[in-house]
Amino acid sequence: MAGHSKWANIQHRKGRQDAARSKLFSKLAKEITVAAKMGDPDPDKNPRLRLAVKAAKAVSCPKDVIDRAIKKSLGGDADDYTEIRYEGYGPNGIAIIVEAMTDNLNRTASNVRSTFAKFGGNLGTTGSVSFMFDRVGEITYPPAAGDADTVMMAAIEAGADDVESDEEGHWIYCADSDLSAVADALETTLGESDETKLIWKPQNRTDVDLETAQKLMRLIETLEDDDDVQTVTANFDVPEDVAAQL
């Protein structure tokens, strides 16, 4: 058990501040539509859809937006999206993974490549940085869920692999294929989670200075602002003194 990364905490707070943005709701709705189209439109029978709906509810996405996204998957006019992963390096060689969902691969590739270049990075080939990350499930709970020992015991009993706790909350990790089962088990003991999702978890993180952190934040924020980009993950961390300046 260890403290969560400072950069991840900054992202977590930023995500809460941005929760009302229509752009975020649009991306969540896109994931819901794709999940429902690929499987069953009933969340109880479709683990991916269940997680997508849970993620949307966690940021107070309106119920009608969720319902419309599911209904859209049933119609013949639903857009055909391709899921694609981009990998590259940011300033100071920080590894970055970008997950996108697009109806125009050429547009998305061009936008991602130019954004990397604009902020001092470069786009690599598939597999060039993903070996430095693990694909896992992440379940987030607030401090009110209990102390570190209580959450750790609940996580072990639910089948999780690891827990990171600090004053801002608890992050529970499990195998990607076990995410739905572990999340359901934890809900019976700890209550509803703040967030439940699949992530790319860095195997190691590199501390960065203020200038590098600022460049990386601009790069990541620009990528996240692209309508086609769903998630951006990087393997850096921000030391406490640098985080205070940010």
Image (cartoon, grey):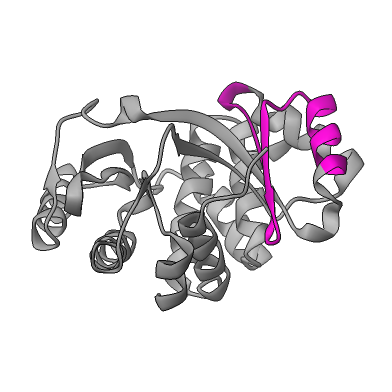
Q: Is residue 221 above or below residue 109?
A: below
Magenta-highlighted residues: 149-177
Give the farthest residue toward the front: 241
Quarter of the image where the N terminus is located: top right
* Residue 239 lies in the magenta stretch: no
Give the farthest residue toward the right: 189
Residue beneath the point at 86% across and 52% down: 146
Residue 125, how many percent across, how many down?
A: 15, 30
Residue 59, how many percent across, how many down?
A: 62, 64
Residue 3, how many percent across, how many down?
A: 62, 49
Q: Do we see residue 196 in this rendering?
A: yes
Q: Quadrant of residue 84?
A: top left
Q: Quadrant of residue 44?
A: top right
Left or right of 57 in this view: 18: left
* Residue 157 lies in the magenta stretch: yes
Q: Viewer-proximal residue, 180 or 44?
A: 180
Q: Viewer-proximal residue, 236 or 183?
A: 236
Residue beneath the point at 64% across and 68% down: 62
Residue beneath the point at 58% across and 42% down: 197
Left or right of 30 in this view: 108: left
Q: Viewer-proximal residue, 182 or 218?
A: 218
Quarter of the image where the C terminus is located: bottom left
Q: Is residue 235 above or below residue 244?
A: above
Residue 69, how many percent across, how many down?
A: 54, 54
Q: Viewer-proximal residue, 80 or 155?
A: 155
Q: Is residue 36 above or below residue 18?
A: above
Left or right of 209 in this view: 44: right
Residue beneath the point at 58% across and 49% down: 70
